Amino acid sequence: GNSVTQMEGPVTLSEEAFLTINCTYTATGYPSLFWYVQYPGEGLQLLLKATKADDKGSNKGFEATYRKETTSFHLEKGSVQVSDSAVYFCALSEGSSYKLIFGSGTRLLVRP
Amino acid sequence: NAGVTQTPKFRVLKTGQSMTLLCAQDMNHEYMYWYRQDPGMGLRLIHYSVGEGTTAKGEVPDGYNVSRLKKQNFLLGLESAAPSQTSVYFCASSPLIQETQYFGPGTRLLVL
C-alpha cells in the first residue's frame, strides 16, 4: 500500500540556519503531496502542496519539489526562525476520497 | 467562520466507559475524517465520510463507530473504551474536488 517515510527528529537548528526535512513516498499512480505543520497544542495546518511531478510548493519561505524520479518531497527553508519550531508532517493524498497518508512527523526546534 | 471545531477538548475515561466526540464544520465541506495521533506514528485514519449519511472505514477502525447524520457534523463513538485508545483525536474536512484538509484543534483522550 501507499506509505510516507520521514526523517527522524528532533531536528535542532540555530536561528537563520538552513533547513532540510527529508520525505520519501511509495504510491501507485500520481498522488498529490503535502506538508502540514503542527504548532504546540494546535491542530495541523497546511503548509504547502504539489499536485504533479516537478511542481514546487511554497509558503512562508518553505519550499518542496515533487520529484517523481526519486519519489521524494523534501522540505527546505533557507533561514529558519524560532517561530518555525513545530512538528512537520509529510503526507500524500490517496484515492477519490482524498484520504491522507501521513509520515510519522519531524519535530523542529530552533534556538535563538 | 469557526472552521472545524471539536468537543470536548480533553476527557478522561475509565476502561469500559463510552463516549462520543463531536466534530462540526461550517465550511459546507463534503468530506470529513477522523484521525488519531500517537507518538512516533503520525496520524492514522480511523473513519471517514464522503457525504451526509455515508461513512467508511479507514486504517484503524476497530473499537470506533461514526455517524454523519448532518453534513456539518461527524461523530466518533467509543462504545467500550480501552487504554489503547488513549490518544489525541483530530477531525478534518475538505471540499469536493480539492485535496486540502482543514483540521480541528484536537481532543485529548485518556483511558485509565
Image (cartoon, rainbow, N blue to C red):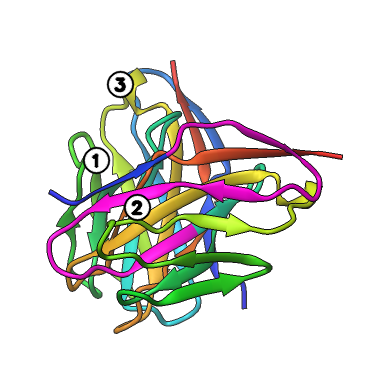
> Helix, strand or loop at disc 2?
strand
Q: Nearer the viewer, residue A110 or B36?
A: A110
Relative to residue A15, is residue B2 depicted above or below? below
For the residues labelled 2 and 1, the Cα–Cα distance comes to 10 Å
Q: Which residues are magenta?
A: A7-35
Q: Which residue is mark 2?
A: B34
Q: Image check: B101 left or right of A38?
A: left
Disc 3 marks a residue whose amino acid type is: Gly
> Helix, strand or loop at disc 3?
loop
Q: Image check: A84 left or right of B94?
A: right
- Is residue A100 in view from this perspective? yes
* Quadrant of the drawing holding the C terminus of chain A: top right
Query: Which label's residue is closer to the chain start, 1 or 3?
Result: 3
- Where residue B64 is drawn, which disc sits there? 1
* Residue B90 in the image, given as x and y percentages of width and height: 45, 49
Q: Which residue is mark 3?
A: B16
Q: Nearer the viewer, mark 2 or mark 3?
A: 2
The reply to whether discs 2 and 1 touch (Cβ–Cβ < 8 Å) is yes
Mark 1 crowd level (few <14, some 14–19, many ≥20, 10 Å Cα)? some
